[in-house]
Image (cartoon, rainbow, N blue to C red):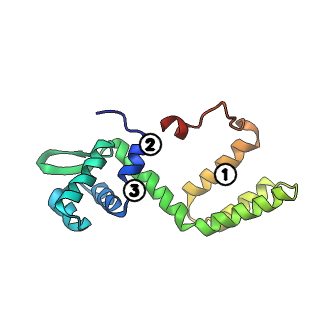
Amino acid sequence: MKEPSVLDVVNSISDDKSLILLDNVAAQPAKTEDLKRISELTRKRYYSRISSLIDSGIVTRIHGGEYQLTLFGKIVHEALKCIGKAAENYWKLAAIDSIESSLVFNGHRLPAEERNRIIDTLIEGNDEIKETLLGNYRSRKGKDAPQTSESKAPLQTAL
């Protein structure tokens, strides 16, 4: 099996039926009959999608014809849950972006304490998103240098 690229992974989960398969396999090992019934896919479409999940290293077939997530698949599934939480908070995140960009446009910078307070208030109960937002702000403030065109982002490198 070759190492999957980010593009392989994204393509394998790029439709709602593949996400249904992924969620069900993540909940517990599942048999083909159950996955086909739950996803409401034809036989051909089911095998096309489950093969794509296997080829991208997300799912593996185990004894008795059941499918389960690989360790890589568990990470992908957790990342998708984080994306889902971000999507649920889209308008709140857009509001924070709007506040920050309006201040930068006017030549000011939002004080860290004020920014943290806004994030804590708006993004209530989503610690993973909060940590991502606060961590990104801390690294921009000085610990990590901003990326230049010479330094490639991990996602670009993976593609």
Q: Spot the residue most to the right.
A: 107
Amino acid carrying mark 2 in the image: Val
- Of residues 158 and 119, the one drawn nearer to the viewer in this rendering: 158
> For the residue carrying disc 2, how many other residues have a C-alpha within 10 Å: few (<14), some (14-19), or many (20+)?
some
Give how far apart the Cα atoms at labels 2 and 1 are: 26 Å
Does label 2 or label 1 sit earlier along the sequence? 2
The image shows residue 57 at horizontal and vertical percentages of 32, 42
The residue under label 2 is 6
In the picture, residue 56 is in which quadrant?
Answer: top left
Does label 2 or label 3 sit earlier along the sequence? 2
For residue 116, above or below residue 57: below
Give how far apart the Cα atoms at labels 2 and 3 are: 12 Å
Q: Quadrant of the N terminus?
A: top left
Q: Which residue is drawn at 40% across and 56% down?
A: 14
The residue under label 3 is 14
> For the residue carrying disc 1, how many other residues have a C-alpha within 10 Å: few (<14), some (14-19), or many (20+)?
some
